[in-house]
Structures are given as C-alpha cells and as structure tokens.
Image (tube, helix red, strand yellow):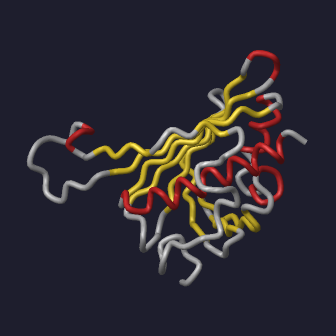
Amino acid sequence: MPGDIGAGGLSSPFPPWGEGEYPGISVGGISSLSPKGRGQGEGGQGETDMASIRREVQINARPEKIWDAMRDVGAVHERLAPGFVVDTKMEEGARVVTFANGMTARELIVDVDDAARRLVWSVVGSPRLTHHNASLQVFAESGGGSRVVWVADLLPDEVAGYIQAMIEQGMGVMKQTLER
C-alpha cells in the first residue's frame, strides 16, 4: 500500500520547520540500543540496533485537559493533532491513523492508564517496521502547565530519523491545539 508507514521511500513533507528547529520541544537525539545491551545475552543471532526516541514538550494547559484529549484514541485527528493526523478509524483493539502526508498506520492500543495519564500503542502489520512500541504521557508542572513525553522504540533503527521528525511535528501540532 503506497501510503503505508513502511512502503516505498521515506520522503515526507514533515517537519515544516527548518532542520533542528522544533519550537518548544526538547530535542535530545536518538539512542540505539542493541538487544545485547537490553539484557538479551551474548551471541544472539540477528543482533540489530533498536532506536529509542524520547521527546518532551511543555504545554500551557492543565494535565486533565491534555489527558482527556490523549485518551480519546479515536479522535486524534479532531482533538489532539488535527492537520497532522487527518483521519482515525477504530477497529477491534486498534486504530488506523491517516497522516497528512497520506501515510497510514494500524496502531494496536496496548494501554490507556488513567492513573498514570499514559497511552501506549504499537504499530502492527507494517512491512517497513519490524517492531514499534510508543507511549505518550502527561505530567503536571508547577504553575498549572504540563509536560508531555513521547517515547518510541523501533526496528529497524534506519527509519528513526523519519519517525523522529514525525514525532516532533506531531508534538508541535499537539502543543498548538491544546494551548487554545
């Protein structure tokens, strides 16, 4: 499928800012962790680096407001990242997200944790990604604001730069949307 997260080349109109310019987003770099480094022992076959991406953004909104939008997993395109995500279709246990660039991803909803204000999902069925697990969590900050943390672990790590750019784009849209 041409718009699938793993099909074809990974060229994209994301992000709209200049490279390395992500307003209000803490950008730290990509960590590559080998399975051996994750405690899976010596001499395993097919040892491949796994990319781990972590981004944070400060949002001038109450954490309850942000969490209410985040936990509404079927309305990403309306409440959390409109314009970045243009459609969300719910299936049993999963959602199919369509991004502005036409790419689609089937995301298995792993956990919606109200107590921790943490959403976990995994892209499944992608011919390009052999592993993907991500979480989005909101924390209260002093002064009534919030900090949102997005973590993604994925294989192969060669797609990490592309996924990182999409995460940063998405967080920028979330910030704009939720601060209204």
Q: Which residue is found at the position 52% from the left and 48% from the top?
A: 134
User: Which residue is situated farthest in the bottom direction here?
Assistant: 1
Q: Which residue is found at the position 72% from the left and 48% from the top?
A: 172
User: Which residue is situated farthest in the left direction here?
Assistant: 43
Image position of 81 with respect to 90: above or below = above
- Residue 119, x across and y down, in percent: 61, 42
User: Which residue is situated farthest in the front direction here?
Assistant: 18
Would residue 40 be found to the left or right of residue 62 on screen?
left
Q: Can residue 84 be seen in this view?
A: yes
Q: Quadrant of residue 70?
A: top right
Q: In which quarter of the image is residue 98?
A: bottom right
> How many numbered discs?
0
Image position of 145 with respect to 136: above or below = above
**The C terminus lies in quadrant:** top right
Image position of 59 with respect to 72: above or below = above
Would residue 56 be found to the left or right of residue 37 on screen?
right
Q: Can residue 111 be seen in this view?
A: no
Q: Which residue is found at the position 64% from the left and 48% from the top?
A: 21
- Residue 165, x across and y down, in percent: 57, 56
User: Which residue is situated farthest in the right direction here?
Assistant: 180
Image position of 113 with respect to 174: above or below = above
- Residue 62, x across and y down, in percent: 82, 28
Would residue 25 be found to the left or right of residue 110 on screen?
right
- Residue 52, x across and y down, in percent: 42, 45
**The N terminus lies in quadrant:** bottom right
Q: Which residue is found at the position 42% from the left and 65% from the top?
A: 129
Would residue 139 be found to the left or right of residue 130 on screen?
right
Q: In which quarter of the image is residue 120?
A: top right
